[in-house]
Image (cartoon, helix red, strand yellow):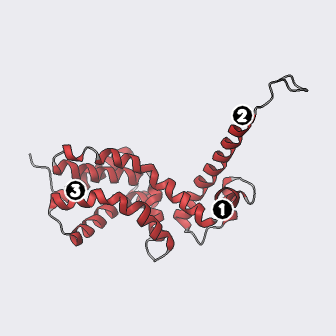
Amino acid sequence: MKSQFTGAPANTPSERAKKTQVRTELARAKMVAAATPMFSQNGYDATSVREIEVAADVKRGMLVYHFGTKEQFWKAVADNIFNLIADQRKARVSVLPDMAEREGIAMIIRFHVRASAQHPEISRLLAQEARQQSWRIEYLVQTHIKPGSEYMKQYVSKALSLTEREFAHWYYIMVSACATIFSFEPECNLLFRFESLEDTVIETHGNMLVDMLLGPSPH
């Protein structure tokens, strides 16, 4: 069928639906991308719906239209952040049974170092939310953090003969040491005059942390 005015094929219902879906996904992605640094740096309460819409360059009311509420939108942002590394983690967990225990723990540490460098917004978001009890930290723990840490708890506790309480200390030492140099990147640059997100820095940090937590590799 030709358009009466241009002679071009008219859009079919399925084509119009696809275009609408593309516009919807683009608008949602723009808002999530804009809100990620805002939530991770400023916090939930200090970030308004309108500020997000302005930062994302979308019309007023688009956030509520696409996500329903600010709460649901925050969950979508959190899901997007944590899901970025979920598949990578699953791939590494699958090979742990075939590795020596020290090599397996070293891989876990290096993975967390690199994930922290690639996504410093994760530790920044946790710094905002983990300090007080709220529905947001409960959502993060139950939906992402606890399921994601279970493999590590079982594997590391067995390999290092740690009690559950001892593993909690090991976990926070490891996670904090992995993330701080990257989430504090501006401070690192001012204090030591190098950019912490460079590949050589990430590799060095991972190697040093493995040696600190496991001791030097036996030769």
The structure residue drawn at horizontal position 26% and vertical position 61%, both measured from the top left corner, is 153
State the CA–CA distance, disc 3 to disc 2: 50 Å
Count residues near mark 3 (Cα–Cα under 10 Å), then give few for <14, some for 14-19, many for 20+: some
Total of numbered circles in the picture? 3
Q: Mark 2–mark 1 contact, CB under 8 Å?
A: no
Residue 179: x and y, percent?
37, 59
Which circle's residue, 2 or 1, is located before the other in the chain?
2
Give the residue number, with chain letter if any, for mark 3: 155
Front residue of 34/208: it is 34
Horizontal side of 38 relative to 128 (left or right) equals right
Front residue of 9/45: it is 9
Q: Mark 3–mark 2 contact, CB under 8 Å?
A: no
State the CA–CA distance, disc 2 to disc 1: 26 Å
Front residue of 80/57: it is 80
Mark yes or no: residue 190 visible. Answer: no
State the CA–CA distance, disc 3 to disc 1: 40 Å
Look at discs 3 and 1 and give the one toward the viewer. 1
Horizontal side of 61 relative to 129 (left or right) equals right
Q: Is disc 3 placed on a helix, strand or loop?
A: helix
Give the residue number, with chain letter if any, for mark 1: 68
Mark yes or no: residue 27 visible. Answer: yes
Identify the amino acid type marked 2.
Glu
The structure residue drawn at horizontal position 60% and vertical position 71%, both measured from the top left corner, is 46
